[in-house]
Image: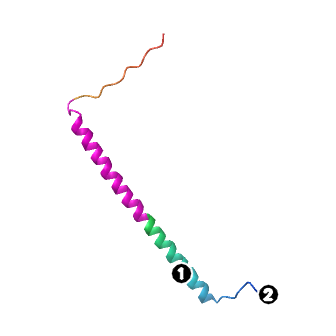
Amino acid sequence: MTPTTPHQKQQSSAENRRQLEESVSRAMERYKSDFEAVRAKSERLRIAREARDDASAQKAPADAAPVKKKRARKA
């Protein structure tokens, strides 16, 4: 076994386990926070998209067919 140097400190397995549990807990909190942020943004985008679609549906007459653009032919 390698001797410990002055800048190293010995940790018990209980201390290592506690640090690991804290690290996992912080990671899970970060994951939950990121997940909630993505869900909130998705909801805002869905509402904006529905509002845009409703506005464009009210602008265009319902019975009008879409008009295709004609392409210019090369001679």
Q: Which mark, residue 7? A: none
The image quarter in which residue 71 lies: top left
Return the x and y of residue 5 as percentages of the image width and height: 78, 85
- In the rendered structure, does residue 55 fall within the stretch colored magenta? yes
Residue visible at 61% across and 84% down in the picture: 16
Residue visible at 48% across and 70% down in the picture: 30
Dominant SS in magenta? helix
The N terminus is located in which quarter? Answer: bottom right
Q: Is residue 31 above or below residue 65?
A: below
Mark 1 Cα-neighbour bin, 10 Å: few <14, some 14–19, many ≥20: few
- Under circle 2, the secondary element is loop
Q: According to the image, label 2 marks what residue?
A: 3
Q: Give the range drawn in magenta.
A: 35-63
Q: According to the image, label 1 marks what residue?
A: 21
Return the x and y of residue 65 as percentages of the image width and height: 25, 28
Residue visible at 29% across and 48% down in the picture: 50
Return the x and y of residue 44 as percentages of the image width and height: 34, 55
- As rendered, which of 66 and 55 lies closer to the eye? 55
Dot 1 or dot 2, earlier in sequence: 2
Colour scheme of the rendered structure: rainbow
Task: Report the amino acid beneath label 1.
Answer: Glu
Residue visible at 55% across and 77% down in the picture: 23
Return the x and y of residue 29 as percentages of the image width and height: 46, 73
Tag 1 near tag 2, CB within 8 Å: no
Task: Report the amino acid beneath label 2.
Answer: Pro
**Is residue 71 rendered to the left or right of residue 54?**
right
- In the rendered structure, does residue 75 fall within the stretch colored magenta? no
Q: Is residue 14 above or below residue 68?
A: below
